[in-house]
Amino acid sequence: MPSLQFTAEPSPTSGTEHRPFLFDVIIAGCGPTGAMLAAELRLHDVRVLVLEKDTEPASFVRIVGLHIRSLELMAMRGLLERILEQGRQRPAAGFFAAINKPVPKGLDSAHAYLVGIPQPVIVHLLEERAIELGAQVRHGCAVAGFEQDDDGVTVELADGEQLRSRYLVGCDGGRSTVRKLLGVGFPGEPTRAETLMGEMEVGVPQEEIAATVAEIRETHHRFWLRPVGVGVYSVVVPAAGVSDRAQPPTLEDFQQQLRTIAGTDFGVHSPRWMSRFGDATRLAERYRIGRVLLAGDAAHIHPPIGGQGLNLGVQDAVNLGWKLAAQIRGWAPETLLDTYQAERRPVAEDVLDNTRAQSELLSTEPGPQAVRRLLTELMDFDEVNRYLIEKITAIGIRYDFGAGPDLLGRRLRDIEVKQGRLYGLLHRGRGLLLDRTERLTVGGWADRVDHLADPTAALDAPCVLLRPDGHVAWIGDDQQDLDDHLSRWFGEPAI
Ligand SMILES: Cc1cc2nc3c(=O)[nH]c(=O)nc-3n(C[C@H](O)[C@H](O)[C@H](O)COP(=O)(O)OP(=O)(O)OC[C@H]3O[C@@H](n4cnc5c(N)ncnc54)[C@H](O)[C@@H]3O)c2cc1C
């Protein structure tokens, strides 16, 4: 493979040996990560094609939790209202190893809650948004192969059709074809314990179920029976000891496991859907090789404890989108695209680690149970409780942008500004100079960075430069220093 150094992109028709580029980016997979990435790229007029192997949405409807940082990102892109219409708000607490504690005091967010929403609904919302913005999405098209060269990537579909783009992003889930074809290692731990999950009707009164379930969950944290509709319950039980792993789970499997744990199967019947998931924990060795990148579950998998996987993928997409767009538009500083892996891989490493820790805390063995009791006591200290919630909800992330005040590298909360709320100014996915001094300027970067002069902004700094993902890239009040940082993140000025 020739040089991996990139410079400003040649014009779309400059491919000589290959057909002209019809697309700048092909995304494999229209799950939450792929759909979010497509929408982010479209904010910058990048020509995007999303290829999704499935023709229909998933038949199982797991409710996922959107955590604070993802809700903030939705607010930053003008999507929060749609999410809130379709989901249910809950307090932002009780997620770390399902240890039940109140919301810690002083959570630093204007959107400090959780939204429970069926995964197919969030995928539909994000796909709809990507299409509204101009992305093309083709269902029933599986990426089966690709080849990359100096100018672009030739992507081959399962039916033999070939398509050409400048970049390919594998958002094709934990079993990612793109990752495998790329030859990127995916080391970690294989599945040790499998879990059955499904939705079904019950044959006994709600009060009876609630009392039994509450008692069992004192010690059995890999089990739940929760109402999701009139007479319909979400059921989660360990899969250990039931039928063939290779076969889809049956109602009998659920009944047997419920009897083992609870002494009764609660008369479960008429399943809506049943599925099985494992607890494998793996992280891709690289997120990028040349013109091919990985995001979401294609880059990292871990048990669903704490509900972080979808959130992590959506946040990967927002980190990557503007950088890849900058590369394609030709203004990206040389190393910008590589900051995607530098910033996001450590975040995934941390999530993998916290799910490993949470898995241990869910064990019914006496040692882990004792550690759980101790941690439960420690979480009565507000600092401890808040630290863990900030970790799970991803508002504690600080990227390493070099030495500087604590806010540098962190996301800025949705503060009040003279035009309303800060996140309302980030819908277009551009940078933003929030300037309390009223004497700075974004000069030749005005085509990429907006400027809000607002001496009244609720900000504990004279001026901050925000990246399109809402992270603080610079803090200060000196024009020359600002210009240096504008160059660092947004390339050469246009004039
Ligand atoms: C029981 C359970 C509960 C969970 N709860 C939560 C939660 O509360 N919160 C949370 O954040 N996460 C949760 N997760 C994790 C979450 O579901 C995943 O992390 C999320 O789906 C990852 O999104 P993705 O877009 O990266 O990958 P996926 O959702 O796997 O999407 C990948 C897409 O790529 C498509 N595809 C695959 N191969 C190809 C190909 N070759 N060509 C084209 N398309 C292809 C697939 O059909 C799919 O549509 C849970 C997971 C489980 C199992």
Image: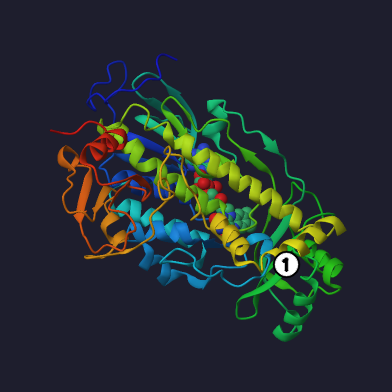
**Whether residue 42 is situated above or below residue 495 in the rendered picture:** below
Residue 479 visible in the picture: yes
Residue 267 visible in the picture: no
Name the residue nearer the viewer: 198 or 440.
Answer: 440
Q: Quadrant of the C terminus?
A: top left
Under circle 1, the secondary element is helix
Q: Quadrant of the N terminus?
A: top left
**Whether residue 295 is situated above or below residue 256 in the rendered picture:** above
| Amino acid at pointer 1 | Glu
Residue 355, percent from left and from top: 66, 51
Q: For residue 179, what is the image quadrant?
A: top right
Residue 433, percent from left and from top: 25, 49
Name the residue nearer the viewer: 376 or 65.
Answer: 376
- Looking at the image, what colour scheme do you see? rainbow
Residue at (25% x, 40% y) in the render: 482
Count of numbered badges drawn on the protein: 1
Residue at (46% x, 45% y) in the render: 316
Residue 36, percent from left and from top: 40, 50
Residue 454 placement, left or right of 336? left
Disc 1: CA contacts within 10 A as few (<14), some (14-19) or many (>=20): few
Q: Residue furthest top?
A: 2
Q: Which residue is mark 1?
A: 377
**Whether residue 351 is situated above or below residue 146 in the rendered picture:** below
Residue 296 placement, left or right of 271? left
Residue 336, percent from left and from top: 36, 32
Disc 1, ligand 1: is the CB inside 8 Å? no
Residue 47 placement, left or right of 243? left
Residue 116 placement, left or right of 447? right
Name the residue nearer the viewer: 440 or 67.
Answer: 440
Residue at (28% x, 47% y) in the render: 43
Residue at (76% x, 48% y) in the render: 245
